Image (cartoon, rainbow, N blue to C red):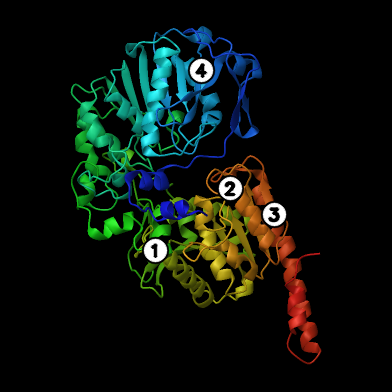
Amino acid sequence: MSCADLCCLFCWPPLPSRIAAKLAFLPPEPTYSLVASAGATASAADRHGVASPAFQLHLSDRAEFQFSNEDKSRFLDAFLATTANGSTIACMMVSAGAHARSKYTLLFSHGNAVDLGQISSFLIGLARRINMNVFSYDYSGYGASTGRPLEKNLYADIDCAWQQLIGRYNLSPGEIVLYGQSIGTVPTMDLATRVNPAGIVLHSPLLSGLRVAFPDTSRTWFFDAFPNIEKAPRIRSPCLIIHGTEDEVIDFAHGLALHERLPQPAVEPLWIEGAGHNDIELFPHRQRHHGAAASAAAGQYAPHDDEGAGRARGGGASMTCRDLCRLFCWPPFPSRIAAKLAFLPPRPTYSLVGDMHSPRFQINPPDMEDPAAAPPAMQLTEDEADCLEAFTANTARGSTIACVLIRTKRIKVHSAFSHGNAVDLGQMSGFLIDLGRKLNMNVFSYDYSGYGASTGRPLEKNLYADIDCAWQQLIGRYNLSPREIVLYGQSIGTVPTVDLATRVNPAGIVLHSPLLSGLRVAFPDTSRTWFFDAFPNIEKAPRIHSPCLVIHGTEDEVINIAHGLAIYERLPRPVDPLWVEGAGHNDIELFPQYLLRLRSFLYDELEAMNASIGADADRAVAGGGSTSTTARDKVRGDQS
């Protein structure tokens, strides 16, 4: 890790572009390459076809291209262009071919964590469905584009893309429609204040960087990044805003507030009921238009209290000195860095009602006056609710955490489940009930501090106190021995799971999409564990002596599979891992081998391995003493 990397980690100096780069940009491993065609020269394509390109587009398997190579050659014109900031960006014109009936061309600025290879199939399908050509490009540092992903480079990138459309394809501004999705709304809005396109589409837009991190921010500070809210009034072209009412990344209030700030008359927006941040395209008809009532609806989407109604429009609490220090990761404690980068607690989707000593778990019902405000958690059936016991417990650090035990009729195993990020027990309850029934096990789970009905703040040190408290509840409240419990951690949940596993001896451990450490997620080339690193699973793995199953998707776009591989190699007692071909970070459970491998681990391997441990202990006692160091080393050694 270089000095520049350390400065970037600590957001120092605290320039908006540095803050933005650390929080907002997640370029994936490139899924394509551009190879210069022998003897070819850059040539323009006409409006409805593609001339011989100067570069050949090669897509990797991870691009999941859904069309033929003939379609790729026929409809995709890829090339490189140089920006004013010195980056070389990859550009792609997608021809609608015979489907092109519109005089317009769409300039598409994509969202985060994808590149042109991954969206190439989507762009072809989009061009055919809207009957117009679509032009897109990769930001600096994405795909085949050089340079670094910085805010100022975003603006230079879209300027370059615009000039390519004007010059290479001989289009006029009145023939171009700008389309920005998520982070892509930032360069789209900036360009729209300087040119006059035929129209603009803002798909899941954000107001500003600070307003995403601190929803109560009421003014635009000089160090704020992505200040879309200040640019919206300067847009003169017709503008359509599209936003999902259940967007878990950029709250729906951002879209509402931007719509209000656009010059009048504004285009009727599209608010899609039930849609999140990444699935709007799957809702062809399930939408309704709030129209003139949009501003009045903004308050209904505040996450925690009535004062949050102005979170994106200027109301609510102002930013405090503590908030500024937290924004700049100063002082640079690992817990501060971890909290800012790793924790995304959703709006609570459940409540604990009644007697707090024996509360009832209740999924928050939808707002009958506005069903779009319903939280994304499925209502439980009466049978499901009966098998769920809820209570609260106090941690050593003063938080009160919500806990649930899901009972199964044919119980064989007890599992302590630490869930992933951006979910709470309400969203997980249906999955956990189903998992318990399919694997014949009781499932115990809990919400981290600051999640769901749990109090406190989501911090790394609180994670460890939370799982310690959960473990003590299993041991004391339910009179279980450590050898009757299997720890299960998913994503960020592997952090407390690994930490606890170094201090207790459960029957077994499952690590689902684990991470090596916080720095290794942000900086994949990090080769050592620094004193300020957060979530250092890599250092703790060798101290785990229970059998451990590692599960990871080969196409994980959040935590690369290299993390799972490295964790597996450092475990003293690993079992055969499960690498799920084609699975990402959030869909491993949809693959049939997931349940098959868990069942084999729980009921074949663990029983055999723990029986071996018991036999060795019996022999040691029969020999006249406790288990020797040699015997312990033997039973804790690698599988033969």
Residue 583 vs residue 326, the one in the foreground: 326
Q: Is residue 109 above or below residue 405?
A: above
Find disc 4 in the rendering and name its residue: 94
Asked whether the viewer can see residue 257, the reply is no
C-beta proximity under 8 Å, tags 4 and 3: no
Cα–Cα span, label 1 and label 2: 26 Å
Residue drawn at the location 31% of the way across and 18% of the way down: 199
Give residue 533's mark. none
x, y percentage for residue 270? 32, 27
In screen coordinates, is 12 left or right of 609?
Answer: left
x, y percentage for residue 231? 24, 32
How many residues crowd around disc 1 within 10 Å: few (fewer than 14), some, or many (20 or more)?
many
Cα–Cα span, label 3 and label 1: 31 Å
Tag 4 secondary structure: strand
Quadrant of image for the C terminus: bottom right
Which circle, 4 or 3, is nearer the viewer?
4
The amino acid pointed to by label 2 is: Asn
Cα–Cα span, label 4 and label 2: 30 Å
Residue 76 vs residue 424, the one in the foreground: 76
Which circle, 1 or 2, is nearer the viewer?
2
How many residues crowd around disc 3 within 10 Å: few (fewer than 14), some, or many (20 or more)?
some
Q: In this view, does 235 lie above or below 51?
A: below
Cα–Cα span, label 1 and label 4: 47 Å
The amino acid pointed to by label 3 is: Pro
Cα–Cα span, label 4 and label 3: 41 Å
